[in-house]
Image: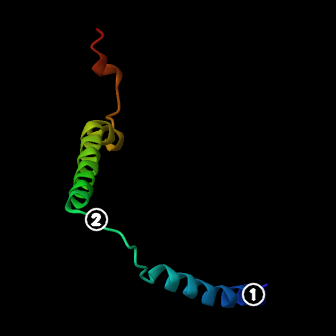
Amino acid sequence: MKENNKAHTSRSGPLLAVLIALLLTPVSAMAYLDPTTGSMLISAIVGLFASLALAIKTYWYRIKAFFKRKPAETDADDGAA
């Protein structure tokens, strides 16, 4: 069983190296990005972080209550006489 696994690893190693090399090879895009595009990308990134911060703030008390231990309730605390 181990011999089969070893053979599989030795075949996939060079293939993985070639795929990584192809992904890291630069390709000319022949495109123009004006300053407005960069500004739009920065605005989108800032908006994403602002949305994440608002979502965390909105659910903060639920998250906090989830991790907080509730005290054990007793019969003496219910106020019944």
Using the numbered discs, state the Cα–Cα distance from disc 1 to disc 2 in whole angstroms. Answer: 52 Å
Instruction: Name the residue carrying label 1.
Output: 2
**Amino acid type, residue under disc 1 in the picture:** Lys
Residue at horizontal 35 percent and vertical 20 percent from the top: 75
Q: Would residue 77 appear left or right of 13 to someone viewing this image?
A: left
**For the residue labelled by badge 2, is the local secondary structure a helix, a strand or a loop?**
loop
Q: Quadrant of residue 38?
A: bottom left
Confirm or deny contact between disc 1 and disc 2 (CB under 8 A). no
Give x and y (percent) for residue 26: 41, 82
User: What colouring does the structure picture have?
Assistant: rainbow
Give x and y (percent) for residue 20: 51, 82
Q: Residues within 10 Å of mark 2 (few under 14, many from 20)?
A: few
Instruction: Name the residue carrying label 2.
Output: 33
In the rendered image, the quadrant that contains the C terminus is: top left
- Total marks placed: 2
Residue at horizontal 75 percent and vertical 87 percent from the top: 2
Q: Quadrant of residue 3?
A: bottom right
Q: Quadrant of residue 69?
A: top left
Question: Height in image: 81 above or below 71?
Answer: above
Give x and y (percent) for residue 19: 56, 82
Residue at horizontal 23 percent and vertical 57 percent from the top: 42
**Amino acid type, residue under disc 2 in the picture:** Leu
Give x and y (percent) for residue 31: 35, 69
